Amino acid sequence: MRKGLISNNIRTLRFHHDEMTQKQLAEKVGVTRQTIVAIEKGKYSPSLELAFRIAHVFNLSLEEVFSFSLEDET
Amino acid sequence: MRKGLISNNIRTLRFHHDEMTQKQLAEKVGVTRQTIVAIEKGKYSPSLELAFRIAHVFNLSLEEVFSFSLEDET
DNA sequence: TCTAAATGTAAAAAATACTTTACATAAAGA
DNA sequence: TCTTTATGTAAAGTATTTTTTACATTTAGA
């Protein structure tokens, strides 16, 4: 699949939500802390399900947490 | 990760968009037809990127195409 | 200074998403 | 009837996501 760019504001959102730690977020969504680290740092993007779970923790829609921009495809 | 349920209305949306075929949708988002079949039939859910791409084709937000419901986690 | 908590990195293994190839069926039209 | 188009299934292989384990660094507080 051609690749666009997915970004997120998880880090910011954690701090805006009572300084939630990576560990706390990981526990709330049911993954390991390493998974949160990798996503925050952009090593890879989460599965659709995990993206939904994370947005849910912050009481936001998925698209308020993750944004996508297409690459050029002429 | 604990699993919730992700569903989608791709099939309906294809018909509402000029009876777009699976093949056409696949080409527009840059995957094979089998991938579209599998997602429509719920064999697995797409990556976050593919979900964004599909929503984009229909000019909808991701959450208008895919919905997520949490399992019970008491 | 010692300890604990939060964050970062890395590597191997497991799980899931996606591709490729191939074949089957049903419906529509020449 | 013959052909084409749309859809479905399946299996093997590749790519990506997630887990597990382990260790390093920084900061805050006792």
Image (cartoon, coloured by chain):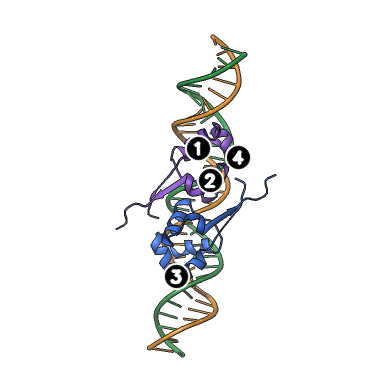
Chain colours: A purple, B blue, C orange, D green
Marks 4/3 in contact by CB < 8 Å: the verdict is no
Asked if labels 3 and 1 share a chain, the reply is no
Asked if labels 2 and 4 share a chain, the reply is yes
Question: What quarter of the picture does the N terminus of chain B occupy?
Answer: top right
Residue highlighted by disc 4: A28
Residue type at the position of mark 2: Leu
Asked if labels 4 and 1 share a chain, the reply is yes
Residue highlighted by disc 2: A60
Residue type at the position of mark 4: Lys
Say whether disc 2 or disc 4 marks the residue closer to the N-terminus: 4
Q: CA distance from mark 2 to mark 4?
A: 15 Å
Q: Which chain is indicated by disc 3?
A: B
Say whether disc 2 or disc 1 marks the residue closer to the N-terminus: 1
Q: CA distance from mark 4 to mark 1?
A: 14 Å
Residue highlighted by disc 1: A13
Left or right of A42? Residue A60 is right
Asked if labels 2 and 1 share a chain, the reply is yes
Crowd rating for badge 2 (residues with CA inside 10 Å; few <14, some 14–19, many 20+): few
Residue highlighted by disc 3: B21
Crowd rating for badge 1 (residues with CA inside 10 Å; few <14, some 14–19, many 20+): some
Q: Secondary structure at mark 1?
A: helix
Crowd rating for badge 3 (residues with CA inside 10 Å; few <14, some 14–19, many 20+): some
